[in-house]
Image (cartoon, rainbow, N blue to C red):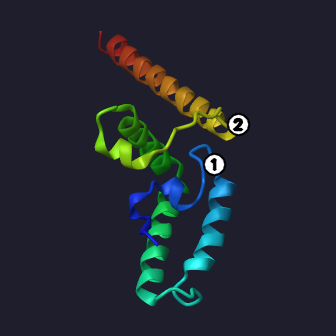
Amino acid sequence: MHSLTSLTYYQRLGLSPGASPEAIRRAYRQLSKRYHPDTSPLAPEVAIRRFQELQEAYLILSNPLQRAIYDASLRAVLSNPGSAERDSLELRMETRPLSGGEICALLLMGSTFLMCLLLAGTLAWLRESGAG
């Protein structure tokens, strides 16, 4: 068997890039039982390495911010036709619609940014009008 290191984090967990957080958690739990050094029939050094590779993939994919950064870097590699990394990945990225939670987070961040701009403008205007 080959090492999981040459695979993307999604491939390590047997998932597509559009996998939901629940699917990521489920796949990690299932595979971590299979490769846990205490329960795996594999040689201890192989089981430890596989388990660590699964943990690495899960830590990145279970964190929304780290997953977004990873997805962007993966898309950049895949969009470069001359990239040796692209040839080794052999993965087609899939686009998926934003979830309700992601849309809510984007709206919240956008409205917070606008409120900060409004507050900064108001404070600048008040300072200027109070100084004159």
Q: Residue at x 37, y 43 (%)?
A: 87
* 102 up-or-down from 22: above or below: above
Identify the residue shown where x is 58% and y is 33%.
95
Residue at the image position 66 percent from the left and 49 percent from the top: 20
Secondary structure found at label 1: loop
The residue nearer to you, when weighing 26 against 31, is 31
**Measured from the top left, where is residue 48 in percent x and y?**
44, 81
Indicate the quadrant where residue 125 lies.
Answer: top left
Instruction: State the image coordinates of residue 127 (x, y, percent, origin top left).
Output: 34, 18
How packed mark 1 is, by other alpha carbons closer than 10 Å (few <14, some 14-19, many 20 or more), is some
Quadrant where the C terminus lies? top left
In the picture of the structure, the residue carrying the numbered disc 1 is 19
Identify whether 68 is placed above or below 15.
Answer: above
Residue furthest toward the front?
Answer: 1
Instruction: Identify the amino acid type marked 2.
Output: Gly
Tag 2, which secondary structure?
A: helix
* CA gap, disc 1 and disc 2: 15 Å
Crowd around label 2: few <14 · some 14–19 · many ≥20 (10 Å): few
The residue that mark 2 highlights is 100
Q: Where is residue 55? Give x, y as percent.
A: 49, 69
User: What residue appears at the point 36 percent right and 39 percent down from the top-left corner?
Assistant: 77
Residue 104 position in % (x across, y down): 65, 35
Number of residue marks: 2
First along the sequence among labels 1 and 2: 1
Asked if labels 2 and 1 touch by Cβ distance under 8 angstroms, the answer is: no
Could you say which quadrant of the image residue 83 lies in?
top left
Viewer-side label of 1, 2: 1
Identify which residue, 66 or 52, lies in the foreground: 52
